Image (cartoon, coloured by chain):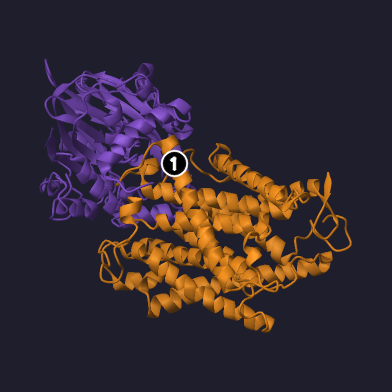
Chain colours: A orange, B purple
Amino acid sequence: MSDGNANGAKFNYLYGLINLAVVFCIVWFLWYVFMHADGVMKLYTPMYGFSLVTVLVASVILLSQVLGWPADSEKPLAAGAAIVRGILGAAISLAIMYVTYYLVFWLFIGKYGVAYFSPSAMVAGGGTGAEPWNAREWASTAILYFTTAFLWWALVWNLGFGRWPWQNDSHWVRGWSRFFVISLLSVVTFALLFHPHVCLLFPEAQKMVGAKPWWEGWADTSSAFFGLGVVLCTMWWVVFSGLFWEGRPWSWFDRDGEGNLLKGVITFLATLAMGLITVYILAAIFNTIWMEPYVGGQYTDGPDWRFIHMAEVGGFCILFAFIWKYYFNNFPNGGPLLLRAFVRSVIGVTGGVLIYWFYYSPLTKFFLGKVHGWAQPDDKPLVWTLLFLAVVLVQAEFFHNWPLRSAGRDRG
Amino acid sequence: MKRRDFLKGMAVTGAAAGVSGGLGLIPKSAEARGKVDFGQVKGVKVDVLSETSWFDNAVFKKDIMDHGGAMTNQYKIPWNWDNAGGYMTKITVYPLEGDPKVFLMDTGWNNGWVDYIYDEKSDMGKLLTSGEVDTMILSHWHLDHYWGIESTLKRNPKITMYAPKTYFPEDMKLLKGGTNVAKAKDGGEVMINKNKVPHQGKLVLTSPDGEKGTGVYQVMPGMAVKMYDVPILLRVRGENVLYFNVKDKGIVTVTGCCHPGILTLNAWARRNVKGYQPYGCYGGLHITLFETWDPKFDDIIKGVKAFKLKKVGCNHCTGWIWAEKAAAAGVPIVKGTNKYKTYKRTSSVAKSSNAFLTNGDTVEF
């Protein structure tokens, strides 16, 4: 049960499966400590836990894909070096998460600029519903949306623009430049896709601050779950094309082996188009299962839920893509690219459906403390999905996928 | 998904219903058998016994958030007992022929509050004791609708109960005459509910399929119970909804919390009830429970307007903010009175706008 990998070493799929089982248990443990209603921290309120885990994933992506540390994460390391680097990477990611969430959003931007990023600023402002619990959920929603925009741009930039236009600069100049431009684009995306929703979160709608949701006529909802659905479905294809299609067809636009403006724009627009097509396809599937949604519908009848459910399906497929890449060596690795890309994509979607089945099966009553059924407004499957993804990414990027892949050992 | 208006969406809904039934992905037995006809009534009168399930939103919310948020198990929270009230509704049904019949929906939370309502603020205590009220519809197993069961059973232990079959062990333990405890912060145990009078009457456990696959349970001609199997906050599942078909008016729904959504209730009736005409609703509508807001609540206002309900009586978990905004937007909200002020306790969110039907108010359909 082994196969060659890109480095020419043998990959043991049984070890991959064992690794996946161990990671599942780690995520289960973390869920119990941080999220489970009977656990220790009880952060799953749900938006507070949702936003925290999203910022954690964004922190890992920021460090590994935007700033590019460590630069050689694909290289197998000896156990000792992998552990040290892994712990360091995880610690830095947690520190970034803490600084971003509590210092940047809560205490800086929220307190001195945009109040809806800070619970205390909203409570201080007073008004109907402005009590600590509501305010924390409102701020969490805003932070979640901003971080989603950041994640989208971070991944699509990496895939499309790559090192351009700083390919001739030093590693850190490139990393920080990328960070600033991605942040800028995230601000614009947040303003267009999510800010109108946040401005309607309050009993007194902030009509002079946020525009009327422009998507309402098309989506039958003024909720920005619409944007969340579109972004996650787009990220689905960013991840699939990056991992499963080995960067094709976007890499055809490379110049001298580097990304460029044309490639970046094409990658962005094409994946967005694929995301929108996916939204249409999923909408049709959902309509078949739950019938047509309608304005004001709740639970499975709500257009807003249909869109966030699209995001959840996208999240499941994204998670499985990373699992397949890191724990199953992106099988298959032989044959023409077109064939292996197709096979991987089919496996990826099947795996996403498998995770979907797991999440909505009675098993999660035991593992996650979930009540069986769909569309409970406080049930956010992306929280568990992103927590899982964070652990997968930390192992892959900072531990150099140790112990599955280790220098001097025949595991991958 | 293309831009469409509500009626167009509803037309498509009918077509999609056939497709989904054909694929067998979800049970659509009612659609498969054609529309259900559960008869008609002359009228329905709803008396608000108590819609104040708790008196202070902040205290109730703190209890939830301190113990794990909305997904936590209601039986694991040592609730602040002083804040507990309860939700109970008296429903008088006027059949096409014969005498009116009275039903009870839900049985509150705090036994002290329920007894006060039954004996001092209404005639429900007498009606239960005399057996004139012999049927209770439990909307769902939430604490504020169910944990006061002892107050009902000590007056009429043989009462017939319709309850969702999706109960948890603690629910049935209480019904059979048990006590549940939760852990307090200091590690000790706190009794959170009790019932010394086991239920001896008929228990109809409802499912979405209904009687003989009709989708509903007919209680009497013109009155039916429909169970929706939906996940609900605080680890509860499933809700019973009352449907009335009022002659020359249309369909009226009476709910405890309406977790599935008021439009879902009407959409189901539109697809499945013979001669459906929208008319009215009463109950908690579960929209802005803690007086906060979300863009989707604006969607609900638009949807309710599009459905052209004639009378919307709401309270409890609907949220005053939603009721006020809906009234301002043209939704026919039935205004309440100031009777609630004569009760020994009132809700901290009650306002002079009277957008809620509050304790002591009545609405007729």
Q: As displayed, is residue A274 above or below residue B132?
A: below
The residue located at (68%, 84%) in the rendering is A170
Can you give x and y, in whole percent of width and height, for residue A241 in the image?
A: 62, 57
Can you give x and y, in whole percent of width and height, for residue A353 in the image?
A: 58, 42
Q: Along the horizontal axis of the image, is A311 left or right of A243?
A: left
The residue located at (58%, 73%) in the rendering is A96
Can you give x and y, in whole percent of width and height, for residue A287 in the image?
A: 41, 39
Which quadrant is home to the C terminus of chain A?
Answer: bottom right
Q: Mark 1 points at which residue?
A: A284
Q: Along the horizontal axis of the image, is B130 left or right of A350?
A: left
Q: As displayed, is residue B155 above or below residue A82?
A: above
Q: As displayed, is residue B25 above or below residue B214?
A: below
Q: Along the horizontal axis of the image, is B144 left or right of A83?
A: left
Q: As displayed, is residue A168 above or below residue A352?
A: below
The residue located at (61%, 68%) in the rendering is A158
Can you give x and y, in whole percent of width and height, for residue B174 in the image?
A: 41, 32
Which quadrant is home to the N terminus of chain A?
Answer: top right
Quarter of the image for residue A283 reads top left
Q: Nearer the viewer, residue A352 or A144?
A: A352
Label 1 element class: helix
Q: Nearer the viewer, residue A398 or A185?
A: A185
**Amino acid marked by disc 1:** Ala
Q: Along the horizontal axis of the image, is A10 left or right of B81?
A: right
Dot 1 surroundings within 10 Å: few (below 14), some, or many (20 or more)? some
Quarter of the image for residue B312 reads top left
